[in-house]
Each structure stands twice: as structure tokens, then as C-alpha cells.
Amino acid sequence: MAVAVNEINASKYGRLLAKTLPAVIKTEAENERMLAEIEKLMDKGERMTPEELVLLELMTQLIETFEEEAYPIADASPHRILQHLMESNDLSQVDLLPIFGGRGRVSEVVNGKRGISKAQAKALAGFFHVSADLFL
């Protein structure tokens, strides 16, 4: 739920800012403190005030920025993504036979010994309901 800045009470928002002291996060301890503040707001659910919603958005952005820098995610190879999707969906290589045609081919793709063609990427995308770009 987006809240326009002109919909918030400046003095209420100022009190919230003074209480929580959101700032650029530089350490894990600061990140944990911000996460705890977010959890307190989230516990309120739909009872959050417009001021609390704006503060929640600010703190979320601060955490996202810190975590993107502190915990960069390396690009995963197509076969690693496939392995993850299979594991997440409790699937085995047999479940991918209709896409790849043979056990040997499935095994080679899953283990990264064979690439994934564009046609296979499209079929995998439809099967897992994700973008084909993940496999290319």
C-alpha cells in the first residue's frame, strides 16, 4: 500500500523518526536493529498508520541497500538454477524427460555437461513458470 508524502502527519512522522533513528546501515548490528524495528511494525498488520507505512518503506530500502552490498549474489549458471528449481519442487531427473527426451541428456544438462537450447529453455520456463532467460 503506497502512501503519498502529503498524506502523512509531519509531527507524527517526526516522532517515529526520532524514536527509530533510521540511517544508512553500515554494520550487521545496525541491520539487525533495523530488521527488529520492521518486525515491530509488521506485527501491527493493517493497523499501521500512514506514517508507519512510510517509515516501513524507508527502513526496507535501507536494509535492501545494505544487504545488496554486504551479501552480493553471484549469477548462477543455468544448470545450477535448474538444480535449485528441481530441488525446490521435489522433482527428479525423470520428471524432465518430456523436455529433454532421454535420461542421458537430462543427466548431462542437470550436471552442467551439456548446455540448454533455446527450445529447452522455453519448455523449462513453461514447466517451472519462470522466465526462459534463467536458462540461457
Image (tube, grey):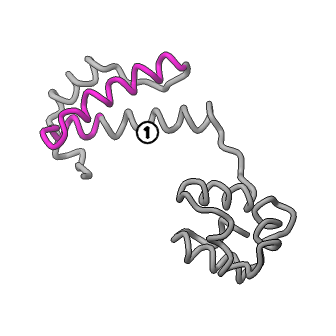
Seen from the viewer's position, the closer of residues 100 and 70 is 100
Closest to the observer, 44 or 90: 90
Question: Which residue does the image show at 50% across and 24% down from the upper left?
Answer: 25
Q: Amino acid at mark 1?
A: Gln
Q: Residue at x 40, y 37 (%)?
A: 60
Magenta residues (range): 28-55
**Does residue 54 appear left or right of residue 63 in this picture?**
left
Query: Residue 31: within the magenta?
Result: yes
Q: Is residue 56 left or right of residue 67?
A: left
Majority secondary structure in the magenta region: helix
Tell me: residue 36, above or below residue 82: above
Check disc 1 and report its element: helix, strand or loop: helix
Residue 34 part of the magenta-drawn span? yes
Residue 110 is situated, as x and y percent measured from the top left of the image, at 75, 62
Does 43 appear above or below 17?
below
Count all numbered tags in the image, as a single digit: 1
On-image quarter of the C terminus: bottom right
Front position in the image: 68 or 39: 39
